[in-house]
Amino acid sequence: MTRKRRRLYIVIAALLVFGGATALVLTALDDSLDLFQSPSQLMASPPPPERGIRLGGLVEEGTVLKSTDGLSVSFRVTDGAQSVPVSYKGILPDLFREGQGVITVGNMGPDGTFVAREVLAKHDENYLPREVVDALKESGQWQGEATQ
Amino acid sequence: MHRFANPARFTRLADRILPFAAVGTVVALGVGFYLALFVAPGDYQQGESVRIMYVHVPSAWMAMFIYVAIAVASAVALIWRHPLADLAAKASSPVGAGFAFLTLVTGSLWGRPMWGTWWEWDGRLTSMLILFFLYLGHMALLNAFEDSQRGYRAAAILALVGVVNIPIIKFSVDWWSTLHQPASVMRLDGPTIHPSMLWPLLIVAVGFKLYYLTVVLLRIKSELIAARLRALDLATVKAAEVQGQAVQG
């Protein structure tokens, strides 16, 4: 075996070992690398109220209630199976609306309401000109915006 | 590959490619940015903020592409000891770092109005930040040793170790729940981006690729010239020493 060939094997072996180790670590960490939990995950193992968590899902249609002071808002976050009521006081991002994917940061209240300190809107992977969306809606082919 | 490891042959080839690459860069970026900023429509959700995407996405592609190029060059340098491969890796990392930085900054500027935050420690954003740090580490290691050969060696090993981060960046949005959206262009079931927005994006991406080619060829060429100058200096010093000894003797 020439030295070049031996170095080639060493580099390949090192890459395989290191790649494998990384894959194992990532698999072991799995859930803890998630940025947010879904309502189902939250319901399955309710966290203690003092622990800050991120709850992610879609804003359930027809549940957004804005209070008269214009700052407080309540809505439900759903993943299709379960939904969690959320209350929030503050400015909402531009993309926030019913059916939109959101991530709320806060704590689970004692009454089962999630008290959010922060609401982030998720953007989906669809990029479309407004005119195209209008045309699709007109012809009745629009699939809706909650496609994430 | 071994053919182009010869510096003289490389320089001749680079001189032939450079004019085309430079002109191509200017044309592609000119056309691409004109289409992206003036012709492409606003997005139905994001409005005009979507135009940030035309810089952000090609920059991110380039940051990952250049890293893979550095890793391949590093492997070639470690295994076959081609000095040109070391130079190619060295020439590439500042360009890649620039693209990674541009990705992070434009992403942050887009994230504030769209997501409602400048930064979130999700899988995609964090792995991209790690890529930026890998570039900085690569540049630092190259210059950390008196003996440049040891610097090349250490930097090449770092580049190869760090390459595991590339699939993590790419698939972070599929493996974990992230704030960042999944891929719109590089996906199995076809792009989810309208053709009127996809074309400007692809043209800018070609422009960035040609820019990288131009800059990297120029940088390798100048490194070769610098190496030759050092060799000449050394030869002059040696000759002077020999002469001095002759006079003394």
Image (cartoon, helix red, strand yellow):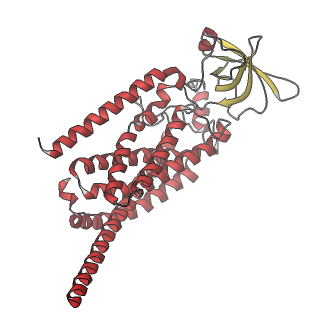
Residue at the image position 66 percent from the left and 13 percent from the top: A83
Q: Nearer the viewer, residue A93 or B143?
A: B143
Quadrant the C terminus of chain B occupies: bottom left
Q: Nearer the viewer, residue B206 or A86?
A: A86
Apparent side of residue B242 relative to residue A123 in the rendered image (left or right): left
Q: Quadrant of residue A45?
A: top right
Height in image: A8 above or below A70? below
Q: Position of residue B167 (x, y in %)?
A: 40, 34
Q: Position of residue A110 (x, y in %)?
A: 76, 12
Q: Position of residue B6 (x, y in %)?
A: 20, 62
Q: Position of residue B10 (x, y in %)?
A: 24, 63
The residue lying furthest to the front in this view is: B249
Residue A18 visible? The answer is yes
Height in image: A7 above or below A121? below
Apparent side of residue A122 relative to residue B19 in the rendered image (left or right): right
Height in image: B1 above or below A126? below
Q: Nearer the viewer, residue B98 or B143?
A: B143
Q: Nearer the viewer, residue A139 or B9?
A: B9
The residue lying furthest to the left in this view is: A1
Apparent side of residue A28 relative to residue B44 in the rendered image (left or right): left
The residue lying furthest to the bottom in this view is: B247
Residue at the image position 73 percent from the left and 24 percent from the top: A116
Total label count? 0
Residue B208 visible? The answer is no
